[in-house]
């Protein structure tokens, strides 16, 4: 089964901007453009196949028809386990927290949400929040949510392009203003909003908070945002490959393509390629297609190789099988 490109899903959340259009060539009338879901088969957003024999087909439909394309051990109907986005935060996102699998299954009927951020761009002085500066009691957190002072006890981390942050489920966090990131996460859209700066939605009302559930799941302590499983770069013929993170839910590598590369695939997992810079051509013999900045490619699980020719930077995402 051959690889194919995907048509993204766009989201117009009020904190979004224009950088996904101007820097990643996203073609949409949606404004502001907050998120571009690059790999998604979720009820809240379902990519469509852009080229090849299944052009126009929703990704979720393709995966139901060909579950083996997800990889061995995932062909029993579990669905796509990850969701990959580009995010442009012109304004800060709400302070929020996501549940783990156990709590999410019990209360929401679905997966929890552990995520990883790769910083693509930032305005001078931009920062994000991740966890707390110190241990905080449930009573203090409840009070600070009520009086709007919760950010005073959150850990404030400055960001630079190329930084990687890991947000395990239960970590209270927020992406700050002026940051563009690529996000790799569990396939969940469950968010418990803790604090939202008093902002109002299109209906003129303040956006709702989810205090009770947030208090249930929040880890009220300093968080380790260092990604697990990272490895130094490995120089390969025509490219450099660096593992950014590897956890139970996803494994993410950064490919710096200087000429050409061969990336081996197998039956255990699909491969997602997201082009962050430059361009390349994916080739298999006489067949192939071009990949430009902002393009997302799905490679079905199979034993073989992906061949890329060109110059660019790519995020490569797979799902671990077995021990980490």
Image: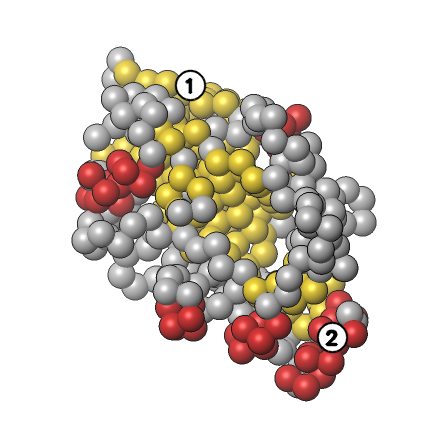
**From the image, which quarter does the C terminus lie in?**
bottom left
Vertical arrangement, residue 43 with respect to residue 288, above or below: below
Which mark is on residue 146?
Answer: 2
* Left or right: where 22 falls relative to 299: right
* Left or right: where 225 falls relative to 288: right
| Residue 307 found in image quarter | top left
Outermost residue on the top side: it is 286
| Residue 5 found in image quarter | top left
**From the image, which quarter does the N terminus lie in?**
top left
Q: Residues within 10 Å of mark 2 (few under 14, many from 20)?
A: few
Image coordinates of residue 228 in percent, x first then y, are: 48, 62
Residue at point 67%, 36% (across, down): 32
SS assignment at label 2:
helix
SS assignment at label 1:
strand
Vertical arrangement, residue 168 with respect to residue 29, above or below: below
Q: Earlier in the sequence, mark 1 or mark 2?
A: 2
Mark 1, residue position: 290
CA gap, disc 1 and disc 2: 52 Å
Vertical arrangement, residue 256 with respect to residue 193, above or below: above
Q: Nearer the viewer, mark 1 or mark 2?
A: 2
- Work out whether residue 61 or residue 236 is closer to the camera in this orientation and state it: 61
């Amino acid at each position: 089964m051959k690889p194919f490109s995907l048509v993204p899903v766009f989201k117009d959340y009020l904190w979004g901007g224009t950088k996904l259009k101007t820097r990643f060539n996203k073609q949409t009338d949606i404004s502001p453009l907050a998120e571009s879901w690059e790999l998604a088969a979720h009820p809240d957003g379902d990519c469509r196949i852009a080229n090849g024999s299944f052009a126009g087909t929703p990704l979720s439909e393709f995966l139901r028809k060909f579950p083996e394309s997800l990889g061995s051990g995932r062909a029993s109907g579990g669905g796509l386990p990850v969701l990959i986005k580009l995010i442009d935060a012109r304004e800060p996102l709400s302070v929020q927290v996501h549940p783990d699998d156990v709590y999410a299954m019990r209360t929401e009927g679905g997966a929890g949400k552990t995520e990883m951020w790769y910083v693509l761009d930032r305005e001078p002085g931009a920062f994000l929040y991740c966890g707390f500066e110190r241990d905080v009691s449930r009573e203090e957190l409840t009070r600070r949510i009520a009086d709007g002072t919760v950010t005073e006890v959150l850990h404030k981390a400055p960001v630079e392009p190329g930084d990687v942050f890991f947000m395990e489920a239960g970590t209270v966090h927020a992406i700050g203003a002026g940051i563009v990131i690529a996000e790799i996460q569990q396939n969940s859209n469950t968010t418990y909003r803790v604090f939202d700066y008093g902002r109002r939605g299109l209906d003129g009302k303040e956006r709702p908070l989810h205090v009770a559930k947030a208090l249930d799941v929040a880890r009220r302590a300093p968080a380790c945002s260092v990604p697990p499983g990272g490895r130094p770069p490995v120089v390969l013929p025509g490219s450099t490959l660096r593992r950014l993170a590897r956890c139970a839910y996803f494994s993410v590598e950064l490919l710096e393509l200087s000429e050409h590369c061969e990336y081996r695939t197998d039956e255990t997992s699909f491969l997602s390629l997201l082009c962050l810079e430059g361009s390349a051509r994916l080739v298999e013999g006489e067949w192939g297609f071009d990949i430009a900045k902002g393009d997302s490619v799905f490679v079905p699980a199979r034993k073989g190789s992906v061949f890329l020719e060109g110059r660019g930077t790519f995020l490569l995402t797979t799902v671990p099988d077995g021990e980490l």
